[in-house]
Image (tube, grey):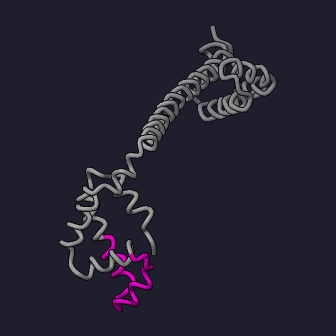
Amino acid sequence: MGIDFTFDELGKHFFANIEAYKLLAYSYVRNDTVAEDIVSDCFLRLWEHKDKLDPQKGDYRMYIVQIIKNACYEYIRMNSIHSKIQNHIQGHKERQLQISLRSLENHEIEANLFSSDVEKIIRRELAKMPQLRREIFSDSRFGLMTHKEISEKYRIPLRRVTWEITQALNTLKIALKDYMPAYMLLFYFMNRK
């Protein structure tokens, strides 16, 4: 036989015992702020479902305890998933750093950047480009001219200068796909506007 209660009685009980409910939540989540949030959410859930509560079904205190336990379980489960994702991301970052460190220790990037193979590929691809594109790219990358200076030299809009350089870099990116660190350095360190 259940205990009859009104929602007002349930609210009075809840707030009279809120510290005990917070302590219950804290015993699972071990965080004061989270425990307080869970208990506050518990009362909101009670309020939202007040019409569904059946006083004949038994002790409403067990209903409150079950809501808190479910919320704690969900918090711990989500925290665990989040922690696993963070650990995976951290592990990936550490692997990337190790690869970068090994690459720096072996001087691979410098060797690739200045290798005769890379130089030959760049010369070959530049020779294939339309004359204006080749000259704009050479002025930008090797002559260290700004986009504005190139625009004035060839009497073309700045957008055209940017477009021609982008097209040249795209061509070199494809040609240097096997020498990606060399391409990245060429693009990054010589990208002047």
- Horizontal side of 36 relative to 113 (left or right) equals right
Residue 117 vs residue 26: left or right? left
Q: Is residue 185 above or below residue 100?
A: below
- Name the residue: 21% across, 74% down: 129
The secondary structure that dominates the magenta segment is helix
| Residue 103 highlighted magenta (yes or no) | no
Quadrant of image for the C terminus = bottom left
In the image, 113 versus 72, the foreground residue is: 113
Of all residues, the one furthest to the top in this rendering is 1
Q: Please provide percent x and percent y for residue 83.
A: 54, 29
Compared to 127, does 43 lie above or below? above
Q: Indicate whether residue 149 is drawn in magenta.
A: yes
Count of marks placed on residues = 0
Residue interval drawn in magenta: 143-166
Q: Quadrant of residue 162?
A: bottom left
Say whether residue 46 is left or right of residue 153. right
User: Residue 84: x percent and y percent?
Assistant: 50, 28
The quarter of the rendered structure image containing the N terminus is top right
Measured from the top left, where is residue 52 in percent x and y? 57, 27
Give 132 or 163, whichever is nearer the viewer.
132
Residue 176 placement (x, y as % from top left)? 26, 56
Q: Viewer-proximal residue, 61 or 23?
A: 23
